[in-house]
Image: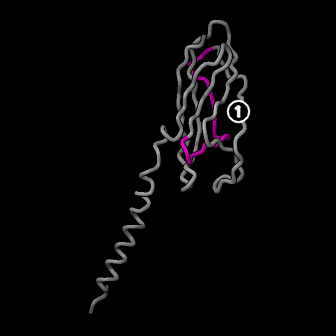
Amino acid sequence: MRIFNPVITRILAGLLGVALFGGVHAQDDLLDPEKAFRVQVHQKDAQTVVARFDVAKDYYLYKDRMRFSVKDAPGVTIQSIKYPAGIVKQDPNFGKVEVFKSTVEVELLLKRTAGSNKMTLLTDYQGCEEKRGVCYMPMQKSAALTLR
């Protein structure tokens, strides 16, 4: 007495393979986070630093997941942050959110004491790939700056 039909067994094995490994293949073509969300930091003037995010096509960044902080900089603090307007999106995970889908520049107004000319800016952010709804873990980049 045969318990398994060999044809059905092969079909089930094939379907199981697609289920287990198909998702892996689908995510192979996702961009690395460094390519999906390129971050550059530069000083605009004596009191302003700009964090520029270049967001790849079909990806987006959450505005409310962006955080900026100063490290290793006695006498330097962030006084205010100026974000451009984003796009309102109904997100399946977080509801109604504001996102950025292209290049965005965030201006950070610094408060500095005399003689403070070095700082490290920590930039935290999170984004997703739009078509498949795959979100990346929160990321952090640091940029050392010599202020003029």
Q: Position of residue 141 (x, y in %)?
A: 53, 31
Q: Which residue is mark 1?
A: 83
Figure quadrant of the C terminus: top right
Colour convention = one colour
Q: Position of residue 85 (x, y in %)?
A: 72, 38
Q: Image check: 124 left or right of 16?
A: right
Residue 50 quadrant: top right
Answer whether residue 107 is magenta in the image. Answer: no
Whether 26 is drawn above or below 110: the answer is below
Point 54% across, 42% down: residue? 56
Residue sitting at the far bottom? 1
Residue 42 quadrant: top right
Q: Position of residue 44 (x, y in %)?
A: 64, 18
Point 70% across, 48% down: residue? 97
Q: Image check: 82 left or right of 7?
A: right
Using the image as rendered, state which of residue 44 and residue 93 is in the foreground.
44
Q: Position of residue 1 (x, y in %)?
A: 26, 93
Using the image as rendered, state which of residue 22 and residue 117 is in the foreground.
22
Point 66% across, 30% down: residue? 106
Question: How many numbered marks does the figure carry?
Answer: 1
Residue sitting at the far top? 115
Disc 1 residue crowd, few under 14, some 14–19, many 20+, Cα 10 Å: few
Residue 80 quadrant: top right
Point 57% across, 28% down: residue? 122
Whether 113 is drawn above or below 63: the answer is above
The magenta segment is 56-74
Q: Secondary structure at mark 1?
A: loop
Whether 40 is drawn above or below 3: the answer is above
**Circle 1: residue type:** Tyr
